[in-house]
Image (cartoon, rainbow, N blue to C red):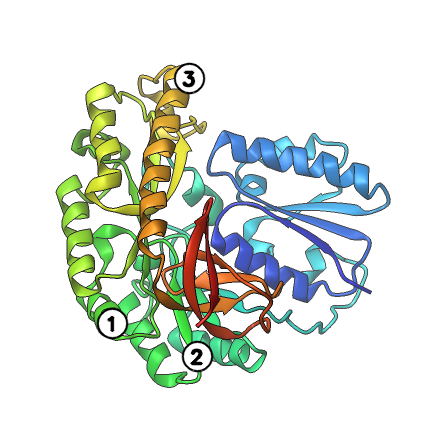
């Protein structure tokens, strides 16, 4: 039996949790679980579409919805005739909520080249645009001992790369005795799991990147040269109205410091287009941030109001303007990425081969395609060309 069908939307934390749910529900062939996202109104719409599609494809299956959208808008999904049950985020790893009449199965965790490991959940901040704290609750961290155990287990099962994930990853440890930082956790992982070839971090808040973490980025080759920053905007007034805790100058300075410490580091970032009160001048500051912070891997979000958040009550930008600004941000990000990819032609890099055997990710997270190689191995690849959003390479 192949197990439950998992449909996962949204962040890497959701991906990590979906992998745990899939392992927990091994053998539950008559079940479809939709792990939803609530970050935008479009994300909720996407979840509803996925539910309807799943019911058409699997009319005999039970459909259970979990995730942030199920937590923040349960009535939306209760009203859907296709949905059999809703599991809140707080219970999403409870087997009985999915299959109440059956005993849990001890299914092995699937073997992947990359393992997403949630080490932090929830958020204590209240950015004015964000609904996620209402779906995830307060910040809480997995103690370092548990993190080490999880990583050792993943490595024993063949993982070559672990990605640390969280809702507010850089808040790691604030709720634990002694308040250990994310940097101290990373140092412990690298020291206590020497057999782990690659460690990667998910999204970081620029105001919480500690000195220990910066030093590790500079000197630890097993910590991948790829940082994704939660920037959101490049204008100080918009950042203030978002209730972000960093300024534009602090973001630019952090990237400059990262580049000085490790020149090959790739910068990713989240950016929002059309936040309430954003005029053309303020948008221009965000647009310029793509170049000012050398953002090669951008995630662009057109602003959408979420009921119950302060930003939803602010003066809104017209939808057609938001759409246009998001397109301009995507164009700027695409140009920056194309130049970044072109710079890598002729370089030799280590690539983690995905399970398809014909593509993978370089240390800087660039996607690389090549002739068939052994899945779940790390290969030296010479980059020969660019093809769209990917690099092309051959064995070095």
Q: Nearer the viewer, residue 285 or 202?
A: 285
Q: Is residue 336 above or below residue 175?
A: above
- Say which residue label 2 marks: 196
Seen at 20% across and 70% down, the residue is 215
Q: Nearer the viewer, residue 228 or 328?
A: 328
Secondary structure found at label 1: helix
Seen at 53% across and 44% down, the residue is 68
**Residue 109 image point, x, y percent:** 64, 71
Q: Identify the image quadrant of residue 292.
A: top left
Q: Earlier in the sequence, mark 2 or mark 3?
A: 2
Q: How many marks?
A: 3
- How far apart are labels 2 and 1 at the CA level? 15 Å
Q: Is residue 113 above or below residue 279?
A: below
Q: Residues within 10 Å of mark 1 (few under 14, many from 20)?
A: some
Q: Earlier in the sequence, mark 2 or mark 1?
A: 2
Residue 392 in view: yes
- Say which residue label 1 marks: 216
Secondary structure found at label 3: helix
Residue 181 in view: no
Q: Is residue 70 above or below residue 13?
A: above
Q: Which mark is residue 319?
A: 3
Please identify the quadrant where the C terminus is shown: bottom left
**Residue 363 image point, x, y percent:** 38, 65
Q: Nearer the viewer, residue 190 or 171?
A: 190
Q: Residues within 10 Å of mark 2 (few under 14, many from 20)?
A: many
Secondary structure found at label 2: loop
Side (left or right) of 196 relative to 184: right
């Amino acid at each position: 039996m192949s197990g439950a069908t998992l449909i996962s939307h949204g962040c890497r934390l959701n991906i990590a949790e979906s992998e745990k749910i899939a392992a927990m529900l091994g053998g539950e062939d008559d079940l479809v679980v939709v792990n939803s996202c609530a970050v935008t109104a479009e994300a909720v719409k996407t979840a509803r579409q996925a539910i309807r599609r799943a019911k058409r494809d699997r009319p005999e299956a039970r459909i259970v919805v979990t995730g942030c959208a199920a937590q923040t808008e349960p009535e939306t999904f209760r009203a859907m005739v296709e949905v059999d049950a809703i599991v809140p985020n707080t219970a999403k790893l409870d087997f009985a909520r999915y299959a109440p009449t059956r005993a849990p199965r001890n299914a092995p965790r699937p073997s992947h080249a990359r393992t997403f490991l949630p080490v932090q959940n929830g958020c204590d901040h209240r950015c004015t645009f964000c609904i996620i704290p209402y779906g995830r609750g307060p910040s809480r961290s997995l103690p370092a001992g548990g993190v080490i155990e999880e990583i050792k287990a993943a490595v024993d099962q063949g993982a070559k790369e672990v990605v640390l994930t969280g809702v507010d990853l850089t808040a790691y440890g604030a709720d634990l005795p002694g308040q250990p930082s994310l940097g101290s956790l990373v140092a412990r992982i690298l020291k206590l799991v020497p057999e782990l070839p690659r460690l990667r971090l998910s999204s970081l808040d620029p105001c919480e990147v500690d000195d220990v973490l910066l030093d590790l980025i500079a000197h630890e080759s097993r910590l991948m040269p790829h940082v994704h920053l939660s920037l959101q905007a490049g204008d100080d007034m918009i950042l203030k109205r978002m209730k972000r805790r960093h300024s534009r100058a602090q973001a630019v300075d952090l990237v400059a410091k990262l580049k000085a410490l490790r020149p090959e580091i790739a910068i990713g970032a989240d950016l929002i287009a059309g936040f309430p009160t954003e005029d053309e001048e303020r948008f221009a500051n965000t647009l310029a941030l793509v170049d000012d912070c050398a953002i090669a891997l951008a995630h662009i979000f057109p602003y959408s109001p979420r009921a119950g958040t302060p930003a939803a009550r602010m003066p809104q930008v017209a939808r057609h303007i938001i759409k246009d600004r998001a397109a301009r941000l995507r164009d700027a990000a695409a140009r920056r990425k194309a130049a970044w990819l072109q710079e890598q032609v002729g370089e030799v890099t280590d690539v983690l081969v995905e399970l398809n055997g014909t593509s993978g990710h370089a240390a800087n997270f660039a996607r690389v395609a090549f002739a068939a190689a052994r899945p779940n191995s790390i290969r030296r690849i010479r980059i020969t060309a660019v093809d769209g959003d990917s690099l092309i390479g051959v064995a070095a």
